[in-house]
Amino acid sequence: MKADIDYSEYWERCWNEEDAEALEKWLEGWNHAGSEEIEYFKAQSVRTICDAACGFGAHTLAFASNGFDVAAFDVSPKAVELTRAGLARFGYGDMPVQVASLTDTGYDDEAFDAVTAYAVFDHLTEADAGCALTEMLRIVKPGGFVLLSFDTPEEDDFSAPHKVLSDGSMVYGSESEREGMIFRPFDDAKVLTLTAGHSVTRKWRSRKGDLIVLLQK
């Protein structure tokens, strides 16, 4: 399903502005990194994972280096390029990474044991977040997992120049370095609305304080 908004322009600009060498050095900390979800997925015999909106591939590398069979995608071609380069540097160049949208991934039905989407649903409009969750559930197997993480809003998220859409999404204007970015912070009520009718098996906070919600199909 086509998204309401074209998100690729903003994110392509962002990733093109990043220092590729610095990002690759940052990736070193994700190689063989541990996390609560990694241990949980191992305990649940998860083998195949799709890292949705992978960015520069930090979580993709963490999963790959912990023995999972990973595929990844991002709406930004530059992000895909960075992820491929980073994975290859650490010996995982055979992991498939593609350009795709959260609302139209192109994967087959029930292709993965788990799908992860880190800090991305809060950068979608309400309608697109609902469509994206439907797509994540489509590509995960029955009994499989969809992991969503949500950023903790900070003061400058609200003080940066922006306009507010009818669904409460903030769109940053030309006066801001975030020009064109969508941000729709999630609180408990919004999480409940997004996940209504789905089985939430776990909720916890990451090491940096982000809310993580795990759904089971």
Image: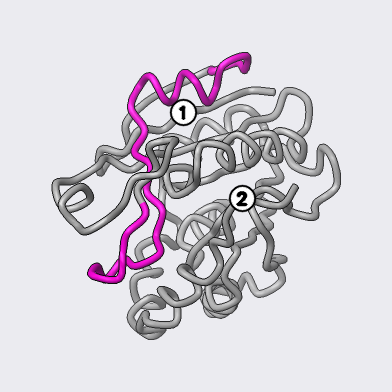
Q: Position of residue 191 (x, y in %)?
A: 44, 25
Callout 1 environment at 10 Å: few (<14), some (14 to 19), or many (20+)?
A: some
The earlier-in-sequence mark between 2 and 1 is: 2
Say whether residue 194 is magenta: yes
Q: Position of residue 79 (x, y in %)?
A: 53, 72
Residue situated in front as seen by the camera: 147 or 157: 157
Q: Is residue 14 above or below residue 19?
A: above
Res 73 quadrant in image: bottom right
Residue hosting label 2: 4
Res 113 quadrant in image: top right
Q: Is residue 17 above or below residue 209?
A: below
Which residue appears at 55% of the width and 22% of the height?
Answer: 195
User: Which image quarter holds the C terminus?
Assistant: top right
| Nearer mark to the viewer, of 2 and 1 | 2
Say whether residue 185 is magenta: yes
Which residue appears at 37% of the width and 82% of the height?
Answer: 17
Q: Is residue 54 above or below residue 169?
A: below
Q: Position of residue 126 (x, y in %)?
A: 51, 36
Residue hosting label 1: 213
Residue type, numbered disc 1: Val
Which residue appears at 73% of the width and 23% of the height?
Answer: 143
Number of marks in picture: 2
Q: Position of residue 74 (x, y in %)?
A: 59, 63
Callout 1 secondary element: strand
Left or right: 123 as drawn, with respect to 136: left
Residue type, numbered disc 2: Asp
Residue situated in front as seen by the camera: 107 or 143: 107
Residue situated in front as seen by the camera: 19 or 134: 134
Which span is picked out in magenta?
171-200
Residue situated in front as seen by the camera: 119 or 13: 13
Q: CA distance from mark 2 to mark 1?
A: 24 Å
Which residue appears at 35% of the width and 33% of the height?
Answer: 211
